[in-house]
DNA sequence: ATATTTTAGTTTATATTATAAACTTATTTA
DNA sequence: TAAATAAGTTTATAATATAAACTAAAATAT
């Protein structure tokens, strides 16, 4: 039987965000925006969802005088990401 | 940059259907239903979408006297599935 | 000095999607 | 022959993703 895929992670943009955050200590909103090519609005919404799920922590501060939002993956986020990858492999390991 | 994920395949149930069909010559509606645990309605809709995309072919016949729908992955479906898996790996290879 | 553009986002509206519930039609079985 | 099961389809609803519109402040140009 196919395992359930975490709906928070089974989303193109949220998965991209998590993928970025899994590789760095932390990343700024504008960096993630550039890397993913997402619009600000979409990114803002999806960051909120990941944050609400406890998968990332979000800190709103300033960089000089400009506002600057910094995101960081949490231990729960790392675990969820790993579980998602494991589950997904059940689906995509077919055909070979 | 993250590659675009084929929206037809980036769906839990449709991906499960494709995963099953990638491994067998063909499969009946009821077999897919049992393997995926999906409801008939949902399965019917998603099979239609995969069929409309040209990723599977659907044959409606009879098994004895009962109607029997048989699904088969197409070459285009195999290719799309492979491309999806390749694209997805860009996302999930992070964190290690 | 003030008008314009850019940065850094948030909120809201829309369009799409997934999903299940309700329905159809025929077939076994009691 | 009445009830239950099989094999789906259609339709309605709820959730989702996405972009458009908006806010507010800072940097830059006039």
Image (spheres, coloured by chain):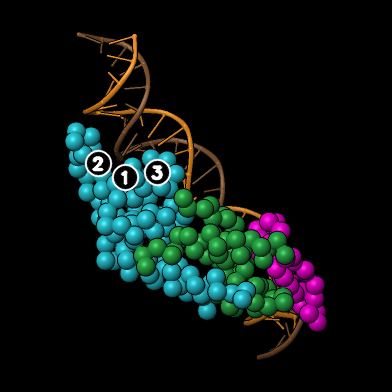
Chain colours: A cyan, B green, C brown, D orange
Looking at the rendering, the stretch of residues picked out in magenta corresponds to B45-74
Q: Which residue is mark 2?
A: A68
According to the picture, the residue beneath numbered tag 1 turns out to be: A29
> Height in image: A82 above or below A47?
below
N-terminal label among 2 and 3: 3
Q: Residue at x 37, y 56 (%)?
A: A20
Q: Chain of mark 3?
A: A
Queried whether the magenta region covers residue B53, the answer comes back as: yes
Residue under the point 45% across and 56% down = A11
**Marks 2/3: CA distance?**
14 Å
- Residue visible at 51% across and 75% down in the picture: A90
| Labels 2 and 3 touching (C-beta < 8 A) | no
Position of residue A89 in the picture relative to residue A72 (left or right):
right
Horizontal side, residue A92 vs residue A47: left or right: right
Position of D18 relative to A83 (above/below): above
Identify the image quadrant of residue A55: bottom left
Q: Report whether residue A16 is seen.
A: yes
Nearest the viewer among A12 and D15 is A12
- Label 3 to label 1: alpha-carbon separation: 9 Å
Please, which chain is the residue tagged with disc 1 on?
A: A
Contact (CB < 8 A) between labels 1 and 2?
Answer: yes
Whether residue A7 can be seen here = no
Against B54, residue A80 (above or below) is below
Which percent across, then down, holds residue A70? Answer: 26, 48
> Residue visible at 51% across and 61% down?
B88
Residue B16 picture location, percent across and down? 57, 70
Q: Nearer the viewer, mark 2 or mark 3?
A: 3
Label 1: which secondary element = helix
Position of A47 with respect to B69 (left or right) is left
What is the number of the mark on residue A34?
Answer: 3
Compare marks 3 and 1 and give the one earlier in the sequence.
Answer: 1
């Amino acid at each position: 039987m196919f395992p359930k895929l975490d709906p928070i992670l089974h989303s193109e943009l949220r998965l991209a965000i998590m993928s970025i955050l899994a590789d760095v200590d932390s990343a700024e909103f504008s960096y993630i925006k550039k890397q993913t090519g997402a619009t600000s609005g979409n990114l803002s919404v999806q960051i909120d969802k990941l944050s609400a799920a406890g998968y990332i922590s979000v800190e709103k501060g300033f960089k000089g005088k400009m506002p600057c939002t910094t995101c960081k993956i949490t231990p729960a986020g790392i675990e969820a990401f790993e579980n998602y990858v494991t589950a997904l492999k059940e689906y995509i390991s077919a055909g070979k």
